[in-house]
Image (cartoon, grey):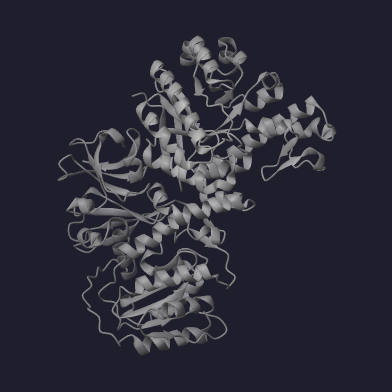
Amino acid sequence: MTIFFELLEKKIGLARIGRIILSKKNKDFIHTPNFLVPINQNLTKNANFNEEFESHRIFITSKKKLLSENFIRVKFKNSAVIYSHKGLITGFIEVLDRKKSFFFENNVIPVIPFNVPNISISKEFSINQINCYLNIAEEILKKNQNINFIFTIKIFNHPELFDLYIAIVKKYENIKVLNFSDLFDNLKNFRNIIKVIIKAKLELDNNIVLMASGRIITKLYPMLIYLGFDLIDSSYILYKSSEGFYDTIEYLLPTYKINFLPCSCVVCRGELKNILKDKYSTEKINLLCLHNLITAKNYANKINQYLKYEDFRDFVEKSSLNDAKLISILKILDKEFYFSLKNETPITQENKTINCLGALSYFRPDFQIFREMVIDTFTPEPETQLIIILPCSSKKPYSDSKSHKKFATAIRKYPDFPNFQEIIITSPLGAIPRQLENVYPVNSYDISVTGFWDEEELAIASKMLVKILDKYNQEIPIICHLEGGYVEIVEKAQKKLNRKFYFSQINNKITSIESLNSLETLIRTYKDEYSAKLDIKTAKTLSKSWHRKLLKLLDYQFGIDSATKVFSNGLLIKEKKDKNQIKIIDPITKDILGFFKYSSGQIALSMKGAEKLVPYEHSKFLVFNGEKITGNTLFRPGILEYSNNLFPNDYVLILDNTKQNLIGLGQMIVGSDFLRNSKTGRIAKVYENK
């Protein structure tokens, strides 16, 4: 099988970073996501166009005159060109027969055209059109198996018609790209859009490149990439330019409305400002084409910057706020298709601030994953004799904030404070056990604080609080040092629980001396009301707080009781000089068990630590088709079996083909859904092996 696409990095939602392989031997790749720059004779004669796009790597044309070796090899020798035939499919077959070797030798990728009107008379008519197209397309694919094709998908506003294409896409390996040519022509049908994309991800090899074409405008780019599209055809921009529209990203403005050019590109600095009001001007159209393409290029560069180095979901949310249909897509994805996004979403991001923009952020997939994992893996410490509920802070981790340092001073006045369970209430994450304050996204999120909580925020936090408190003995007293909306959250939870809650008296502010004195009084009064099992192991060189954190972090990552196995002898810690991670040591054998990384909030186990996680199948694992790993990357053909709950960036055990021996440790590049729906590709980075 010829590998055409390689996934390099998964991002939130269905977004991904990858590369199209033109020549592995010559290391010739086109990075994705990318946008296709349309070319015609007018544009290629324009010196400014050539200067702006000389380093671009992928273009699209429908002009047969440009399909010449002299033109392609001189103008686009280091690029790929997609040929999108605008006539009937019979005309395309004639071009293909004449240019077959030319396509193969010059990185020209043909689109099998489906050029019929998007508006169909009826569903039956649409089915007939699709079946006719599929019959002809299959003959083309069968006859030209050495050529990589782009296969066109039309659904005519009937998402169920996508099923008609699945069999042929699975059958022919020379279909390398799926071109959804009418999916985004009507954004009002956002549910249809989502259904088709999710179906493609679930049914087809995830290494197939997804391409969006049709009525694609620049402001859709972030959402298209979030939905998993690798290539975006910008040809529609030329059509809108011919109608006199000027692209500002947020809007396509008719030129007669423009009095102030909001751009300083070569076009806007030049003649365009002088001819904006001209009604019939070929020069104006040509200049608008160039400006609009430059705008698209700059926006695509900005998107890729955010995708690679910032929190991309934040960027998608911000770019959707001025379009109700885009907001609807995000909301529907989060609430109705979460389980399709779940294992596609990285479990952590490093060194990134996660800005929460309000209700649109509450159910982003990584937040939902976190809530689920806390509820599933967090178990009460048997020594717990008191629960203290506290408000969040803007500084992360909470323990480093001024307010929480004051809370800690009050709480730690009592020698038995390690037996107190602290729970922090926050929006939009919910209820956070103190032990998990260093894990993503708790260590990274930021949200505006006004003191006002909407109903959804209250519901999220109270629901999670109920589920955590339900794990504890009902006789354990619960002290609440809260004010404002935090109190309302606890009161909502209180109605669903048969438990004892005690509220401190807040005087002026929550950190005032009087308020803290009230907290201390409650602790002193109720700390001995419940007799807990005091059997916790201690380590002289370890603060009790970090002991508790590391135990719960390991359970959070690998499942309940993982920490009991790995830290069976207790643990010591040693902070590295650069203070970016903590070394975890077995106090008896002196073996290094792993490292806690501040940037990710995760523990990377060592082989010595991971060997204690027997039976390995109860943890997160990959089964390798062999007995020894060579190299630092695992690929799909080498994986025999895997856990069903793997996320991108998860730490994972690598077992040999007998499933009895641990032969390595890795960090996932993809999740279990990709493994299930792919035949090739990178799966995990190996960071230690035998």
On the image, which quarter does residue 259 sit in? top right
In the rendering, at what x and y percent does residue 535 appear?
21, 75
Question: At x 48% / y 30%, what residue is drawn?
Answer: 128
Residue found 53% across the figure and 13% down from its top = 95
Image quadrant holding the C terminus, namely: top left
Residue in view at x 21 percent, y 56 percent: 590
Quick check: can you spot residue 346?
no
Q: Is residue 245 above or below residue 569?
A: above
Looking at the picture, how far across and down is residue 374, in whole percent? 35, 63
Q: Quadrant of the N terminus?
A: top left
- Residue 533 image point, x, y percent: 22, 78
Q: Nearer the viewer, residue 575 or 60?
A: 60
Q: Is residue 115 above or below residue 662?
A: above
In the rendering, at what x and y percent does residue 555 appear? 29, 60
* Residue 398 vertical position relative to residue 279 in the rendered view, above or below: below
* Front-most of residues 685 and 622: 622
Position of 3 with respect to 630 (left or right) is: right
Left/right of residue 658 with respect to residue 349 in the rendered view: left
